[in-house]
């Protein structure tokens, strides 16, 4: 056992740190305060007892609603600085800073078209009418009386990312309009059965209670399959930005169809052709003709670590990890390329592998310190393989804005800095 005299004193540690700083960096480059702060931090390292062990911490209940550590204050949603952020706004999930597959509610991406309404759930109503045998008006209490279910699904904006440069520097810049949560609510099929569908019912038009009256037409087949009316997210009631007190969830469909602040469902024989499914959210092809109703989000993946904006500290072992998802079902496999797409190796998929949910993948890698381009490629259970950007553009041209599910490569320089290889 070491004697006390064998341990380096705080003063000797400070002298060592100061000497290291001066030896590695010009003394004028660091202030005395910075040197003192570095020395103070060293006092909390082994074999010393750190400061936070010397006094009791905050008592339970000091924060009625829990918050992250102050040292994680930079893990926040990203709001694009070059886009107007008022009524029609968006903020992006910091995917490169997250682990697992569930997005915390406070980091879930936002997209709204008329601001976030402040809705009193006691005064909120859901109207169900149109081609039904019995038109109904539901309170939130009525909705919660139906048998509940909880399922994990992703949501993704169809403009995630766009087809034109600049694409962005980080994983959040590229595909941050994507998040995944456990949703709790009721089967839309049960609610429709309560009203009774008429034989000519082919579509359901969903309308939100926001200032934009967001409206989308949904095929009846989807409504009778896995669609839900949800009121909770990750175990707590929906937040206002996510549609409180009620939204529709259409697993695998483009994000804006999952209408928030849901107030009305009208059963019809035809789609309504609203603004958000004519002038917006249609895919222009190379000849200027628009594809109609491209509901599903295709298979997609991205490496989140190491990724753009990060830096590898040194050669050696590094785990490549990222996420994959598909609106058509489960992810079947993810492949990794370490040579700009010339060859591919299969990554390990982390359980659980769920339908229309984010799946995390992992790949062990030894970096030799040389420049390299890494990328991932997803394949879903239908056999669909994620394409390159060049392959997409060759089919759709450069008029498209939505449904870009291309492979996104990262370039790692010899100094470890990582950038978007597509930029």
Image (cartoon, rainbow, N blue to C red):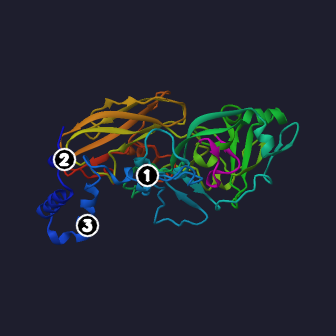
For label 1, the residue is 172
Using residue 187 as the reference point, say whether residue 55 is left or right of it.
left
Residue 361: quarter of image: top left
Residue 145 in view in this figure: yes
Pointer 1 local density, CA inside 10 Å: few below 14, some 14–19, many at least 20: many
Work out how far the residue at label 2 is from the one at label 1, CA to CA, in angstroms. Answer: 50 Å
**Mark 3: few/some/many CA within 10 Å (<14, 14-19, 20+):** few
Quarter of the image where one finds residue 35: bottom left
Residue 4 — which label? 2
Callout 3: SS: helix
Is there CB contact under 8 Å for labels 3 and 2?
no
Query: Would residue 245 be counted in the magenta stretch?
Result: yes
Viewer-closest of 166 and 173: 173
Query: How far separated are the C-alphas under marks 1 and 3?
Result: 32 Å
Image vertical order of residue 235 relative to residue 29, above or below: above
Please state if 2 lies on the left or on the right of 268 as rendered. left
The structure residue drawn at horizontal position 72% and vertical position 47%, both measured from the top left corner, is 206
In three-dimensional space, the C-alpha distance between marks 3 and 2, rounded to whole angstroms, equals: 29 Å
Q: What is the magenta range?
A: 234-249
How far from the left and from the top, in percent, is residue 121? 76, 52
Q: Earlier in the sequence, mark 2 or mark 1?
A: 2
**Residue at 26 percent of width and 35 percent of height:** 365
User: Pointer 2: residues within 10 angstroms few (<14), some, or many (20+)?
Assistant: few
Question: In this figure, which residue is indicated by the disc labeled 3?
Answer: 34
Does residue 65 show up magenta in the picture?
no
- Identified at 37% across, 45% down, the residue is 408
Q: Using the image, determine if residue 14 lies above or below residue 174.
A: below
């Amino acid at each position: 056992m070491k004697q006390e005299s064998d341990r380096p004193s705080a003063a000797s540690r400070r002298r060592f740190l100061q000497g290291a700083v001066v030896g590695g960096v010009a003394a004028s480059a660091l202030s005395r305060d910075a040197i003192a702060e570095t020395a103070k931090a060293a006092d909390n390292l082994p074999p010393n007892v750190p400061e936070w062990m010397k006094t009791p911490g905050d008592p339970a209940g000091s924060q009625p609603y829990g918050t992250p550590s102050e040292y994680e204050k930079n893990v926040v949603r990203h709001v694009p600085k070059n886009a107007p952020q008022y009524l029609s706004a968006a903020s992006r999930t910091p995917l490169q800073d997250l682990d697992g597959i569930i997005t915390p509610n406070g980091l879930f991406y936002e997209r709204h078209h008329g601001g976030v309404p402040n809705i009193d759930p006691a005064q909120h109503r859901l109207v169900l009418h149109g081609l039904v045998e019995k038109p109904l008006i539901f309170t939130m209490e009525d909705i919660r009386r139906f048998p509940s279910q909880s399922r994990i699904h992703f949501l993704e904006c169809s403009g995630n990312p766009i087809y034109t440069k600049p694409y962005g520097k980080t994983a959040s810049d590229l595909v941050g309009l994507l998040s995944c949560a456990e949703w709790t609510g009721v089967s839309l099929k049960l609610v429709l059965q309560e009203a009774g569908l008429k034989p000519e019912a082919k579509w359901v038009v969903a309308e939100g209670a926001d200032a934009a009256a967001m409206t989308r037409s949904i095929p009846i087949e989807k409504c009778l399959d896995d669609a839900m009316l949800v009121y909770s997210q990750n175990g707590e009631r929906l937040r206002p930005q996510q549609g409180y007190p009620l939204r529709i969830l259409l697993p695998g469909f483009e994000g804006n169809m999952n209408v928030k602040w849901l107030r009305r469902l009208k059963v019809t024989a035809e789609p309504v052709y609203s603004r958000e499914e004519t002038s917006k959210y249609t895919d222009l092809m190379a000849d200027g003709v628009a594809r109609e109703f491209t509901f599903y989000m295709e298979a997609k993946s991205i490496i989140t670590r190491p990724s753009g904006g990060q830096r590898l500290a040194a050669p050696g072992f590094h785990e490549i990890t990222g996420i994959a998802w598909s609106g058509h079902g489960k992810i079947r496999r993810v492949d990794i390329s370490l040579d700009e797409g010339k060859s591919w190796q299969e990554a390990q998929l982390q359980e659980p592998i769920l339908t229309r949910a984010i799946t995390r993948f992992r790949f062990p890698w030894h970096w030799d310190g040389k420049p390299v381009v890494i990328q991932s490629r997803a394949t879903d259970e239908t056999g669909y393989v994620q394409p390159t950007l060049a392959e997409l553009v060759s089919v759709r041209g450069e008029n498209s804005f939505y449904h870009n599910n291309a492979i996104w490569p990262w370039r790692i320089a010899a100094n470890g800095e990582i950038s978007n290889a597509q930029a």
